Image (cartoon, grey):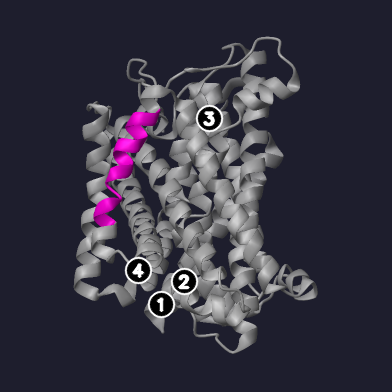
């Protein structure tokens, strides 16, 4: 297929485009700090409340047995986010814009619809997770908690008006809060180092046990998130690096370091949630624990530490709020990129938030609060089903010399990336076959 003629140049996320200065000729440390930030905004999508539901279920039911799935998912995420950095820096277009430039309008619109479904599923998880955190900490009913999450739209606007660095600083603060809470929880739980090490060894049981595969696909969907691919390829363009081959190569290098470090932190969080669930519940006779509320209620009695449940709820709230901030930005980027549709920032973000809040409130009102964790797990499986529609265009574009020039993927990267895509799509087809043929 021949690419369509690109639309006139329009920057991605225009209010933040090239607003962060990169020092010319600065030291490695100064440049590293200048490029640091986008990776952490992306990383919060890898530790959002959807991860909590799937990781808690995996740890409580199967002990440390799914740690290798988290590791594999994280390695795939690092590779895909590296390709997003390359696409955004080398072409000056985010993934949504690149799809609009390249594909016929019906195809681009179809990809936009699929992406909106993925963002809605992601937002649903984040809104519900934040609402659960507010309920556990302050006793606020879930429906009211969902409504309160609308306020984060105003927070994004306030911070971004002051500069994109303020948005990044808030997200980094929330991420560090999550990490500190889980470090304390793991010290309380005292998990088995030998058991953890064994959990990183792949097992064929995953493909024989449909329920285990279901949770594993949920972990995959919660870890590698479609909207993060669109988000990352856009926000790397907030850096005002030199638009020369050498400047772009440097931006790709530092952007990759930023995202890799941030995703290593996300891996610690994801693995920590599963290890905590395994140590506290699976090996203490509570394998049935899957609800976040049950985990909160049992943590302090099981671990014998009164503050354990409070730390758990605080980390959940921080996770939900950081994820809603980046999810709102992703919604804006996707709408602008695919449709070239410009709205005032407050209206654009309010629309994105309402699309998530209203379905969440309807589901909670109809199904009841006790179904929230099942809702979170299903949202992650839906996300996983959408991954191929974002991953395949990303691999096609970054492997195209006409688009990437000297930054086109080398053969070994193409092989790794397409192997990742085949694995993602194959696991999803296996899940669908087991679900409909059982």
Hey, which quadrant is residue 413 in on the image? top right
Q: What secondary structure predominates along the stretch shown in magenta? A: helix
* Contact (Cβ within 8 Å) of mark 1 with mark 4: no
> Can you say which quadrant of the picture contains the N terminus?
top left
Q: Residues within 10 Å of mark 1 (few under 14, many from 20)?
A: few
Residue at the image position 43 percent from the left and 62 percent from the top: 380
Question: Is 153 colored magenta in this rendering?
Answer: yes
Mark 3: secondary structure: helix
Return the x and y of residue 114 as percentages of the image width and height. Answer: 33, 49
State the CA–CA distance, disc 1 to disc 4. Answer: 17 Å
Where is mark 4, residue-wise?
Answer: 375
Circle count: 4
Where is mark 1, residue-wise?
Answer: 435
State the CA–CA distance, disc 3 to disc 1. Answer: 36 Å
Residue at the image position 23 percent from the left and 59 percent from the top: 359
Magenta segment: 146-159
* Contact (Cβ within 8 Å) of mark 2 with mark 1: yes
- Is 7 placed above or below 303 here? above
Mark 1: secondary structure: helix
Where is mark 3, residue-wise?
Answer: 87
State the CA–CA distance, disc 4 to disc 3. Answer: 33 Å
Q: Residues within 10 Å of mark 3 (few under 14, many from 20)?
A: many
| Left or right of 351 on screen, residue 122 | right
Residue at the image position 47 percent from the left and 52 percent from the top: 318
Question: Is 161 colored magenta in this rendering?
Answer: no
Where is mark 2, residue-wise?
Answer: 431
């Amino acid at each position: 297929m021949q690419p369509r003629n690109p639309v006139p140049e329009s920057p991605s996320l225009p209010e933040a485009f090239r607003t962060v200065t990169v020092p010319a000729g600065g030291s490695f440390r100064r440049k590293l700090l200048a490029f640091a930030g986008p990776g952490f905004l992306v990383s919060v999508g890898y530790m959002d409340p959807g991860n909590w539901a799937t990781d808690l279920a995996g740890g409580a039911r199967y002990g440390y047995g799914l740690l290798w799935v988290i590791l594999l998912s994280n390695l795939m995420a690092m590779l895909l986010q590296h390709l997003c950095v390359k696409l955004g820096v080398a072409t000056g277009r985010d993934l949504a814009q690149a799809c609009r430039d390249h594909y016929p309008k019906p195809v681009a619109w179809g990809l936009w619809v699929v992406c909106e479904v993925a963002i809605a599923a992601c937002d649903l998880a984040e809104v519900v997770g934040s609402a659960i955190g507010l309920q556990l900490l302050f006793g606020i009913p879930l429906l009211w908690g969902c409504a309160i999450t609308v306020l984060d739209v105003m927070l994004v606007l306030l911070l971004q008006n002051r500069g994109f660095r303020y948005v990044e600083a808030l997200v980094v603060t929330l991420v560090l809060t999550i990490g500190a809470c889980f470090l304390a929880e793991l010290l309380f739980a005292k998990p088995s180092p030998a058991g953890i090490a064994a959990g990183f060894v792949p097992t064929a049981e995953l493909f024989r046990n449909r329920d285990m595969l279901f949770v594993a696909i949920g972990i995959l969907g919660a870890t590698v998130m479609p909207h993060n691919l669109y988000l990352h390829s856009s926000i790397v363009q907030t850096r005002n690096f030199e638009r020369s081959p050498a400047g772009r190569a440097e931006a790709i290098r530092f952007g990759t370091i930023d995202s890799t470090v941030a995703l290593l932190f996300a891996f610690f969080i994801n693995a920590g949630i599963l290890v905590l669930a395994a140590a506290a519940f699976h090996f203490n006779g509570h394998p049935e624990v899957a609800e976040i509320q049950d985990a909160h209620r049992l943590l302090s009695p099981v671990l014998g530490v009164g503050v354990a449940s409070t730390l758990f709820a605080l980390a959940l709230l921080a996770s939900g709020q950081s994820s809603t901030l980046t999810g709102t930005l992703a919604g804006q980027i996707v709408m602008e990129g695919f449709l070239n549709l410009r709205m005032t920032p407050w209206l654009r973000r309010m629309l994105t938030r309402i699309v998530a809040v209203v379905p969440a409130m309807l589901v909670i009102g109809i199904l009841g609060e006790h179904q929230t964790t099942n809702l979170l797990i299903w949202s992650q499986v839906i996300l996983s089903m959408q991954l191929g529609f974002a991953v395949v265009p990303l691999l096609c574009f970054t492997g195209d010399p006409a688009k990437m020039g000297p930054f086109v993927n080398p053969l070994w990267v193409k092989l790794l990336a397409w192997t990742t895509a085949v694995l993602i799509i194959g696991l999803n087809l296996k899940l669908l076959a087991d679900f409909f043929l059982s």
